[in-house]
Image (cartoon, grey):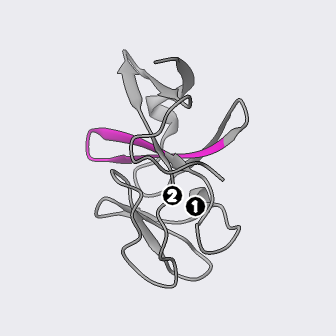
Amino acid sequence: MTFERACALADVPKDEALAVTLGEYDLAVARAGDEFFALQNQCSHAAVALSEGEVADGTVECWLHGSCFELRTGKPTHFPATEPVATFPVEVRGDELFVDTTTTLNGVTPA
C-alpha cells in the first residue's frame, strides 16, 4: 500500500467533510467519532461534491438531492443515488491522516 499525507486530523470537522486532492483523485475526508474515512468526493447520482454535505450517524449527505453514503462502505442509504462511491484505506499517524489511493476498500472504481 502507498499512503500519502492527506491532512492534519485537526483539519477534519466533526459534522462535515474536508475536500482533499491526492494525485488524480478528489476525496472527501470525514470523521465519525474517533474514526476517519476517505471517500470519492463525488456523489454517484450527480457530479456534486460530497465534501459540501453534512456528516452525521456514520454517513455523508449530498447536499443537492439528499442522497446519503455510508462512510465505511460508500453504499448509498437514501435515494436518488443507487450506486456506491469508492472508499479508500486510511491510516492515522500521530496527528496526521494518510490515504492510499492505489486501491479501494469496496472495489468501486473511482470516477
Q: Which numbered tag is attached to residue 85?
A: 2
- Residue 19, horizontal then vertical, whole percent: 62, 46
Is residue 19 positioned above or below 84 on the image? Answer: above
Q: Is residue 33 magenta?
A: yes
Q: Does the magenta stretch include residue 77?
A: no
Task: Report the front residue among 59 and 78.
Answer: 78
Task: Report the front residue among 75 and 53.
Answer: 75
Task: Report the front residue among 104 and 56.
Answer: 104
- Residue bearing mark 1: 50
Name the residue rendered at 37%, 15% in the picture. Answer: 94
8 sits left or right of 89 in the view = right
- Residue 35, horizontal then vertical, whole percent: 29, 40
Kindly identify the amino acid type of the residue bearing the numbered disc 1.
Leu
Q: Which numbered tag is attached to residue 80?
A: none
Circles 1 and 2, Cβ within 8 Å, touching? The answer is yes
- Residue 83, horizontal then vertical, whole percent: 49, 69
53 sits left or right of 15 in the view = right
Main SS, magenta region, reads: strand
Magenta residues?
26-38
Give the crowd class for mark 1: few <14, some 14-19, many >=20 residues within 10 Å: many
Name the residue rendered at 41%, 70% in the picture. Answer: 76
Kindly identify the amino acid type of the residue bearing the numbered disc 2.
Val
